[in-house]
Image (cartoon, rainbow, N blue to C red):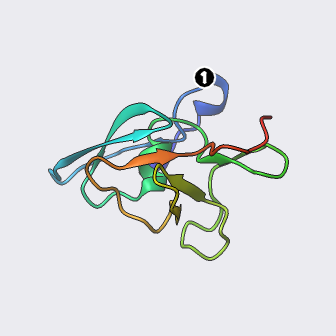
Amino acid sequence: MTTNPSAASAGEPQFVRLTEAHRKQVGLTVDGAAITALTGDTVLSAILLHTRRVRDTEFSGEPRAGFCLMGACQDCWVQLEEGTRIRACSTFVKEGMHVLTRPAGAVEA
């Protein structure tokens, strides 16, 4: 994957998949929208292949797209529908997963 240099101005996804090794597709939802990812993708990469942000910070409502991408900075916390918080950068997608990037109580930007 690589970042999409034209994405900021065009409102396109943050990431672009460059090549693939024929991995199985996985279906999940993000904020109620059905998306597909590939087996072995992280939640963060699945989200950023479809949009520009992973979440909005609960403090200011500003959009976040992850920072370190290895689980140390904790900038990519999202919530599963049942309430469990996960780090999107270090959690692999699972079939039927329901991810919330704007949990109840979050500040709107």
Residue occupying the point 46% across, 47% down: 99
**47 or 20, which lies in front?**
47
Of residue 84 and residue 47, the one placed in the foreground of this image is 84
Q: Which residue is mark 1?
A: 10
Disc 1 on helix, strand or loop?
Answer: helix
Q: Residues within 10 Å of mark 1 (few under 14, many from 20)?
A: few
- The answer to whether residue 71 is visible is yes
**In the depicted structure, whether residue 97 falls above or below residue 89:** above
Amino acid bearing label 1: Ala
The residue most toward the top is: 10
Q: Position of residue 28 (x, y in %)?
A: 33, 43
Furthest residue in direction bottom, as rendered: 72
Image mark count = 1
Question: Residue pushed farthest right?
Answer: 60
Task: Answer whether residue 6 is visible to the viewer in this image.
Answer: no
In the rendered image, residue 53, in percent from the top left (x then y), is placed at: 61, 42
Q: Can you give x and y, in whole percent of width and height, for residue 89 in the image?
A: 50, 63
Q: Is residue 21 left or right of residue 42?
A: left
Is 19 on the left-hand or right-hand side of 10?
A: left
**Quadrant including the C terminus:** top right
Q: Residue at x 58, y 32 (%)?
A: 7
Determine whether, in the image, residue 30 is placed left or right of residue 9: left
Which residue appears at 29% of the width and 56% of the height?
94
Residue 62, by quadrant, is: top right
Q: Percent x, y for residue 77?
A: 60, 60
Residue pictured at 51% horizontal, 62% vertical: 84
